[in-house]
Image (cartoon, coloured by chain):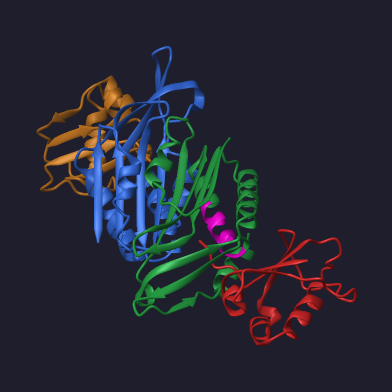
Chain colours: A orange, B red, C green, D blue
Amino acid sequence: MKVTYFAKTRELIGRDSDSFDLPADIRSINDVIEYLSAMDEPYKNALANPEALRFALDNEMAKGDASIQNISELAIFPPVTGG
Amino acid sequence: MKVTYFAKTRELIGRDSDSFDLPADIRSINDVIEYLSAMDEPYKNALANPEALRFALDNEMAKGDASIQNISELAIFPPVTGG
Amino acid sequence: MMRHIAVQITPFDAGQELRKFEGNRLGAVASFSGIVRSENDIIALSIEHHPIMTYMALEKLCTLAEQRYKLLGVTIIHRYGTLKLGEPIIFVAAASAHRKEAMAAIIAIMDRLKTDVPLWKKEIFADGTSRWIEQKQSDVDRSSAW
Amino acid sequence: MMRHIAVQITPFDAGQELRKFEGNRLGAVASFSGIVRSENDIIALSIEHHPIMTYMALEKLCTLAEQRYKLLGVTIIHRYGTLKLGEPIIFVAAASAHRKEAMAAIIAIMDRLKTDVPLWKKEIFADGTSRWIEQKQSDVDRSSAW
């Protein structure tokens, strides 16, 4: 699965996107966040407070408990501040 | 005193303005309206419903009972419809 | 504080008026344009104004709006004379640090303008006849809310 | 129904956008321009967007506004990239038969845009440092009112 990062999340992780072969037991967005947080320091920092993050699955907004089955792209970003 | 007319009031009276030497007992705007209404048909028609008219004394909005003492110009017009 | 008030027979360029607010670090600019629309099968509107009181009333409206909404700039242009379908009648713009104030100012100015400024509209029809527009009670109610 | 949506790095001409609504007998056109202002001693804003979702979210906002406010036309332009003080960030315009709908649409679009569209602003300071702007609770509250 492709994982993309935006704004502060992108800067903290230091990358625009990653491509992961996720283990079979990673089923929801929350599972992905937990999985990434266990990788290294930048991911841990960037994803430390999932309540303050927003997610999209294949360009549609989604909650943390949404299933990632048949999803090709997860986007992770902070609450928006446009306008 | 100069009396000016605007919009529908002007069209009904058929003139932009008049200049009158008013009798001493004409003291308020209402007195002027009554005086003019007694003149001829166009004035009577145009001023038939003073409740539906608006007045200004020397370019300041005024109520019908306002005194015309020391006033040089009375404007008579319908409720406004700009914008 | 930028203030621009005009009551004019000539057309105006709303875009050019809006551009005057740019580059001023104002934050928020709201605007409203009123355009002659094809209601009641009219072909034009004829707009009459009081040459002195109209300008004075617009000045008063601007002062009220500037104070209440902390405006950094305000523009009101109202045309008179005969305006065909599609022609702009009025342009109002307000600049403030924040969008809420700029937008509220535009709404308040338009609402008050409908009852406080000596302008009158007449509908002109294709057959040469015409009819003065009557003031709407809804406009009076909306204006008195400010 | 005219609809124009753009998410672009290049500047736009708000006046030109406004003029597109003229001559169309629309009645009422309301607009809002957001401009980079000198808050917190910034020298610029850096704006990031989601290249696909931002456009989709603006489309959705337009559809909602068109239906709710009987719009005859709507324009939303949002810039991204680095914008200096005084540069326009966003332009929203809505056309309707009546002023009330056009103005309400602009307010609703701006309120919803603050929470529903994946755009992020970063403040850039003179010393080269920068800081991401945090979403305001007041924006969340205002948006949820629609």
Task: List the single residue furthest toward the right.
Answer: B24
Task: List the single residue furthest toward the top.
Answer: D127
**Residue D120: percent from the left, percent from the top?**
34, 34
Looking at the image, which residue is at 18% across and 34% down?
A3
Q: Name which quarter of the figure residue A54 lies in.
A: top left
Q: In the image, is C17 to the left or to the right of B82?
A: left
Where does the magenta region start and end?
A: C106-115
D67 w.r.t. D58: above or below: below
Is residue D124 located in the magenta-colored stretch of the structure? no
D4 or B25, nearer to the observer: B25
A61 or D46, nearer to the observer: D46
**Residue D40: percent from the left, percent from the top?**
50, 24
C97 w.r.t. B4: above or below: above
**Residue D97: percent from the left, percent from the top?**
38, 66
D116 or A9, nearer to the observer: D116
B44 or D72, nearer to the observer: B44
Q: In the image, is C3 to the left or to the right of A21?
A: right
Q: Is residue A79 visible?
A: no
